[in-house]
Image (cartoon, rainbow, N blue to C red):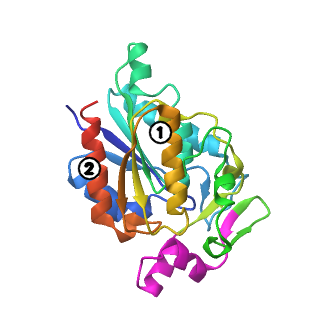
Amino acid sequence: MAKPSIVLIPGSFGVPELYDNNIIEAITAKGYEIKGLHLPSVGLKDRPRETPPTMYDDAAFIAKEVAILADEGKDVMLIGHSYGGIPVTQSTKGLTKAERQKQGKTGGIVRLAYMTALVPPLGVSSANILSTLPDENRVEFGTDDKGWLYIKNIPAAASVVLSDYSDKAEREALIEMFQVHSSTSFTNELTHAGYKDVPVSYLLCQGDLCILPQTQKGGIEIIEKESGNKVDVTSIKAGHCPNITALEEVVDWIERAAEKCELF
């Protein structure tokens, strides 16, 4: 069987460059086609910006990229990190391999892979989920006059987002690479539960201070309840950005998930 094409969806404020020199490079070296997307909801700090896009704009953007691959006859695995889990889930309608086969088409989504990601039930937004975070785990944001969120306190954010990264200066430099994010996208509710239609893998990060382990487990329970299928769960001792702090384990997880796609 051919290897699946992999599409990686970064977390909020995140750009593909944060994944290029670790995950994308390592997975490419293993013979997989992989691409990281720059979501519409992630703006650039140093450029003029228009009205912030929605989570639905993100989902449509992902769907467009997947459709191109599927129309080439390729099987696709979507990976969603953090906030990315929600637009990934929303984006799959009509694009699963099973749905496309019914239309006489080849290719399509064969697996969703969530990396310490938000996975809500229908009618719930990322803001709903994150509202339960204790104060000490909240990153402080500001909002500009157009509705873009920006990180106000870099050192404090670094201590939460990269809690398992020991070098203080380096972790703050990494947080400086984060951009701005649409405030609207966090309020948009899930209207399509894509995890009901394809097998799911989940990388549970036990040390995550942004999406707490109990929140991750809650998402897994939602998937299993709604789909009637078990989630393939891998648990590691890492924080919110395992792509930076636990690269080898993340690459192994992606490769195992991709190998399961080849059996689809």
Q: Which residue is mark 2?
A: 255
Provide residue 258's location: percent of width, then percent of height. Answer: 28, 43
Residue 63 visible here: no
Q: Which residue is mark 1?
A: 224
Q: Residues within 10 Å of mark 2 (few under 14, many from 20)?
A: some
Q: Which residues are magenta?
A: 149-177
Residue 221, compared with residue 247, is above or below; it is above
Contact, CB < 8 Å: mark 2 with mark 1?
A: no
Q: Residues within 10 Å of mark 1 (few under 14, many from 20)?
A: some
Residue 110, compared with residue 182, is above or below; it is above
Provide residue 92's location: percent of width, then percent of height. Answer: 50, 33
Circle 1 SS class: helix
Q: Is residue 211 toward the left or the right of residue 149 in the image?
A: left
Quarter of the image where one finds residue 243: bottom left
Q: Which mark is residue 195?
A: none
Q: Is residue 148 toward the left or the right of residue 81 in the image?
A: right
| Closest to the observer, 62 or 227 | 227
**Residue beneath the point at 57% across and 58% down:** 12
Number of marks present in the image shown: 2
Q: CA distance from mark 2 to mark 1?
A: 22 Å
**Residue beneath the point at 26% across and 46% down:** 32
Looking at the rendered image, the quarter that the C terminus falls into is top left
Quarter of the image where one finds residue 77: top left
Give the residue type that dot 2 points to.
Glu
Disc with the residue nearer the chain's start (2 vs 1): 1
Q: Is residue 40 toward the left or the right of residue 239 in the image?
A: right
Does 125 lie within the magenta span?
no
Looking at the rendered image, the quarter that the N terminus falls into is top left
